[in-house]
Image: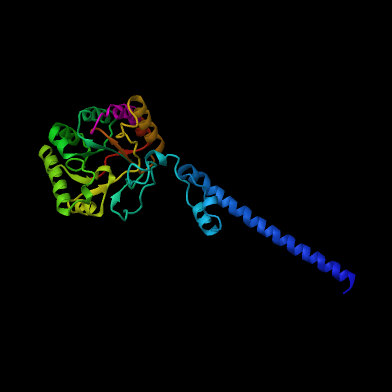
């Protein structure tokens, strides 16, 4: 073979190798980009970097990168309930497959208060009245029995009623159908002793521990199952108290409420003075930013 042909062949070989090397380099660069993009959020939440966890599985890495990063507030209440997280989601466009309503379905925001009525309920009612805000009260049967006059005030002021079981039984949903039905019916009956004929269109399982049986039985009794999207953990008095609890409630509700949110708080079931102090700040803020509604009946 002549020298020119040898030189030409060598040049072609070098060019081919160079192109192959560039292709490999580009592929590696884009893979690391994908991994890094999904890793920043996941590492903060779960403590493992997808780049390390998914080596050799570019399809999985790319799928992970396509998913939105966890909300910065997710750690606030992710374990509080099966309601996803404290971060509010967008309004639902269709009924959830599990039958649990977790958003208002509109741009309006719903404030909900659990475990009452109790000693702080009149203070909350006065604040709501002052600002012209309607809310939803999830009532516990034994508390209704103790404070029927507060239930009457709730209804008189135009708020919505919700069944929260007879004694706040977090395990009710795992019991027999007859037991679940008897508990919910007994609670409704006690509410109706205080406010005959008042509509009770919602059921909220204590702890958010909904089961298909509880959802179905509530539905048979004419009640939709009511979840939430924002939970400031005002029930967790072992973790925060006093001014720190108030600051925590204000920050969580302020930072996570979005159009369509259902916000969970408590007006009874323990010392709720911090919650009342928080809502003294929150009510005018929320009213300025959102349309606040009671859940419709």
Secondary structure mainly formed by the magenta segment: helix
Where does the N terminus fall, quadrant-wise? Answer: bottom right
Magenta region: 269-283
The residue sitting at 15% across, 34% down in the picture is 152
For this view, does 260 lie left or right of residue 151? right
Q: Residue at x 24, y 44 (%)?
A: 170
* 246 relative position to 222: left or right: right
- Position of residue 291 relative to residue 240, above or below, is below
33, above or below 153, in the image: below
| Residue 152 horizontal side relative to residue 99, left or right | left
**Residue 288 in the image: x percent, y percent?**
37, 33
Q: Judge by depth and name the residue closer to the eye, 264 or 107.
A: 264
- 108 and 142: which is toward the camera: 142
Task: Reply yes or no: does residue 28 show up in magenta.
Answer: no
Q: Is residue 60 above or below residue 284?
A: below
Quadrant containing the C terminus is top left
* x and y, in percent, of residue 89 in the image: 39, 45
């Amino acid at each position: 073979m002549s020298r020119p042909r040898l030189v030409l062949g060598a040049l072609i070989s070098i060019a081919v190798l160079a192109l192959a090397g560039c292709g490999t380099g580009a592929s590696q660069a884009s893979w690391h980009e994908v991994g890094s993009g999904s890793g920043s959020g996941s590492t903060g939440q779960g403590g493992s970097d997808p780049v390390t966890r998914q080596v050799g599985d570019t399809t999985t890495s790319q799928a992970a990168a396509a998913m939105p990063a966890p909300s910065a507030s997710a750690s606030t209440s992710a374990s509080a309930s099966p309601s996803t997280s404290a971060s509010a989601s967008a309004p639902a466009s269709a009924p959830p497959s599990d039958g649990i309503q977790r958003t208002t379905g509109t741009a309006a925001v719903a404030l909900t208060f659990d475990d009452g009525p109790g000693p702080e309920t009149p203070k909350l009612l006065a604040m709501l009245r002052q600002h012209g805000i309607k809310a939803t009260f999830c009532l516990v049967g034994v508390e209704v029995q103790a404070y029927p006059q507060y239930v009457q005030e709730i209804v008189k002021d135009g708020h919505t009623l919700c069944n929260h079981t007879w004694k706040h039984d977090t395990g009710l949903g795992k019991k027999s159908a007859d037991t679940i039905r008897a508990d919910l019916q007994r609670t409704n009956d006690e509410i109706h002793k205080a406010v005959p004929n008042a509509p009770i269109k919602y059921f909220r399982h204590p702890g958010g521990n909904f089961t298909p049986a509880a959802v179905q039985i509530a539905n048979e009794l004419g009640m939709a199952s009511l979840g939430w999207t924002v939970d400031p953990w005002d029930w967790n008095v072992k973790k925060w108290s006093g001014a720190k609890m108030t600051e925590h409630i204000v920050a969580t509700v302020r930072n996570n409420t979005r159009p369509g949110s259902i916000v969970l708080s408590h007006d009874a079931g323990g010392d709720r003075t911090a919650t009342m102090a928080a809502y003294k700040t929150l009510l005018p803020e929320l009213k300025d930013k959102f349309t606040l509604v009671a859940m419709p009946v």
